[in-house]
Image (cartoon, grey):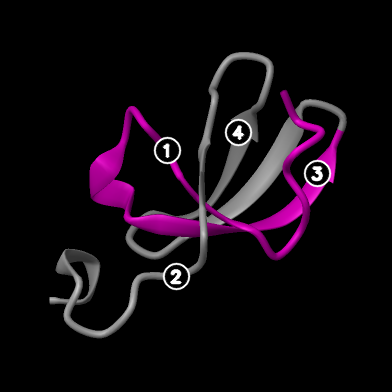
């Protein structure tokens, strides 16, 4: 379901929690380019991977920031 994904939205990859949060850079069809905090830029196939949408980046003191 790529319709819910828009550039600027924050996501997490459910199969790669060590990548941290990511920010969507572009969406073209099922191809979602995401810049993850610990894995850099990744091209995700939205037809295969169901990214978890976040409300925003983690705040100070969250596990991702420690």
Q: Give the spatial CA distance, label 4 vs label 3.
A: 10 Å
Picture coordinates of residue 61 (x, y %)?
A: 17, 81
Q: Which mark is residue 44?
A: 4
Quadrant in which the C terminus appears: bottom left
| Badge 1: residue crowd in 10 Å (few <14, some 14–19, many ≥20) | some
CA separation in Å, label 1 and label 4:
9 Å
Crowdedness near tag 3: few (<14), some (14–19) or many (≥20) residues, C-alpha within 10 Å? some
What's the residue at 32%, 60% (across, down)?
38
Residues under numbered marks 2 and 4 in contact, where contact means CB atoms less than 8 Å apart: no
Q: Which residue is mark 1?
A: 13
Residue 37 within the magenta-colored segment of the rendering: no
Q: Please state the extent of the stretch shown in magenta in the rendering.
A: 1-28
Q: CA separation, marks 2 and 1?
A: 14 Å
CB-based contact (under 8 Å), mark 3 and mark 2: no
How far apart, in angstroms, are the residues tagged by discs 2 and 4? 19 Å
Which mark's residue is nearer the viewer, 2 or 1? 2
Dot 1: what SS?
loop
Q: Which residue is mark 3?
A: 27
Whole-angstrom CA distance, mark 1 to mark 3, is: 15 Å
> Which residue is disc 2 drawn over?
57
* The quarter of the displayed image where residue 37 is located: bottom left
């Amino acid at each position: 379901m790529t319709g819910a994904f828009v550039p600027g939205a924050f996501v997490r990859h459910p199969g790669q929690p060590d990548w941290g949060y990511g920010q969507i850079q572009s969406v073209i069809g099922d191809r979602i380019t995401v810049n993850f905090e610990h894995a850099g830029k990744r091209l995700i196939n939205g037809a295969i991977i169901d990214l978890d949408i976040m409300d925003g980046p983690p705040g100070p003191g969250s596990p991702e920031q420690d």
